[in-house]
């Protein structure tokens, strides 16, 4: 993969608010083997996209 193609994939993933980027065939195979979203493996990621509540002192 050309470096420019990988950069494009990374920027697209950031725009789509994704947690990861599949950069090559091996990575795609590993991701498919996991058979589930990353949030299933790391439940603490589920709430990271919600706005933070104001902290009162």
Image: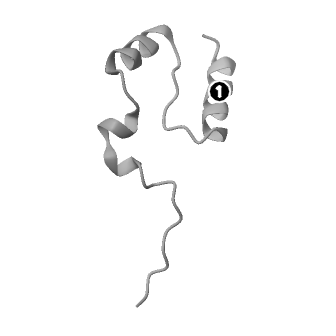
SS under mark 1: helix
Q: Residue at x 59, y 42 (%)?
A: 17
Look at the picture and state if 7 lies above or below 52: above
The x and y percentages for residue 41 are 30, 36
Q: For residue 16, which quarter of the picture? A: top right
The x and y percentages for residue 10 are 61, 30
Residue 44 shown left or right of residue 5 in the figure: left
Residue 16 shown left or right of residue 49 in the figure: right
Look at the picture and state if 20 lies above or below 33: below
Please identify the quadrant where the N terminus is shown.
Answer: top right
Q: How many marks?
A: 1
Q: For residue 42, which quarter of the picture? A: top left
Look at the picture and state if 53 lies above or below 43: below
Q: Which residue is mark 1?
A: 7
The x and y percentages for residue 12 are 67, 32
Q: Residue at x 51, y 21 (%)?
A: 22
Foreground residue, 57 or 35?
35
Q: Residue at x 40, y 16 (%)?
A: 32
Q: Residue at x 43, y 87 (%)?
A: 56
**Display coloring:** one colour
Packing grade of label 1 (10 A; few <14, some 14-19, many >=20) is few
Q: Residue furthest bottom?
A: 57
Residue 21 shown left or right of residue 35 in the figure: right
Please identify the quadrant where the C terminus is shown.
Answer: bottom left
Foreground residue, 23 or 29?
29
Look at the picture and state if 29 lies above or below 35: above
């Amino acid at each position: 993969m050309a470096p420019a193609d990988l950069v494009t994939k990374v920027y697209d993933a950031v725009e789509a608010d994704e947690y990861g980027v599949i950069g090559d065939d091996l990575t795609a195979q590993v991701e498919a083997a996991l058979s589930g979203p990353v949030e299933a493996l790391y439940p603490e990621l589920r709430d990271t996209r919600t706005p933070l509540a104001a902290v009162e002192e």
